[in-house]
Amino acid sequence: MSAGESSGSVVRRMLLGSHLRRLREARGITREAAGYSIRASESKISRMELGRVSFKTRDVEDLLTLYGITDEMERTSLVSLAKEANVAGWWHSYSDVLPSWFPTYVGLEGAAHLIRSYEVQFVHGLLQTEAYAHAVVARGMKGASAADIDRRVALRLERQKYLVSENAPEFHIVLDEAALRRPYGDREVMRGQLQHLIDVSERPNVRLQVMPFSFGGHSGESGSFTILSFPESDLSDVVYLEQLTSALYLDKREDVGQYEGALKQLQTDSPGPAESRDLLRGLLQLS
């Protein structure tokens, strides 16, 4: 199965969840009442409507009955969508070395047509070299076996294939200078990473900017974040915020708008792609 097909299953979950939410709201039915009808909690209905969980055929059928959907063609179409949405993603085989919240992000990332991000701690995973990724993962997974570290790095490299695929997304990234100066691995690892950033920044679908120390305080004060946008008009943008023991996925318009505003300001305040490339070359010469 290709990455596109398996990422599509995440989008199908989101589309089905969004459709079920609209049907429920049109009938004036609460999430609590919907949950009761399928022997589930209100929070389970919420997760279903956000596309965060897989769908049981029986649950979808019961909800459609509750929402008054009797047309057989419509019911069959939505139940088929539920079955397609349950296809495991290619990353499923890495679940033993992934935090529980991360597979959802990998699916969303692989389905997005525009990825916008700000990073301050280290280079974004889509732009890491294998050696740099190994140093980052090894530091973050202290006590893990060499095999588990290698598998996590392999997943990161697999994700990067999407960035150079035929249907590659637009990737707009602002890297804080701190992420470029903080050493992961030895001098050669860092030099290799800086050269890779220079090279990848030349790709037509990549817009890479560096927020320099010299600018001072800026709009990225809340830390790293990623905004994912999808080609399907039914799907709202999602902001991904990674935390130490969990992650947040924000899709309320007002929340997304705040992060979009912060990123636009970061892009405005940072040197442009060509100047940022010069900054990277300067750091490479100093390293």
Image (cartoon, rainbow, N blue to C red):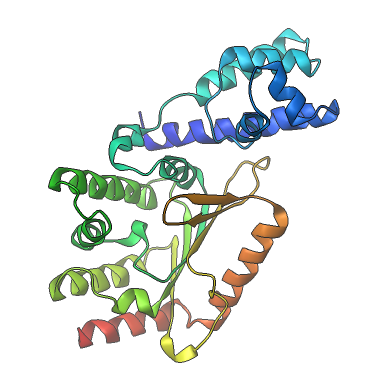
User: Is 284 drawn above or below residue 53 in the view shown?
Assistant: below
Image quadrant holding the N terminus, namely: top left
195 sits left or right of 273 in the view = left
Position in image of residue 50 (x %, y %): 62, 37
Quadrant of res 151: top left
Q: Residue at x 33, y 65 (%)?
A: 200
Q: Residue at x 18, y 61 (%)?
A: 131
User: Is 22 drawn above or below residue 224 in the view shown?
Assistant: above
Image quadrant holding the C terminus, namely: bottom left
Position in image of residue 203 (x %, y %): 38, 63
Q: Report the residue that reaches farthest toward the bottom.
A: 214
Q: Residue at x 52, y 26 (%)?
A: 54
Position in image of residue 122 (x %, y %): 34, 68
User: Is 258 drawn above or below residue 244 in the view shown?
Assistant: below
Q: Residue at x 29, y 61 (%)?
A: 128
59 sits left or right of 148 in the view = right
Q: What is the count of numbered marks?
A: 0
183 sits left or right of 109 in the view = left
Is 146 or 196 nearer to us in this picture? 146
Position in image of residue 228 (x %, y %): 54, 52
235 sits left or right of 121 in the view = right
Quadrant of res 36: top right
Is 192 or 250 nearer to us in this picture? 250
User: Is 274 drawn above or below residue 231 in the view shown?
Assistant: below
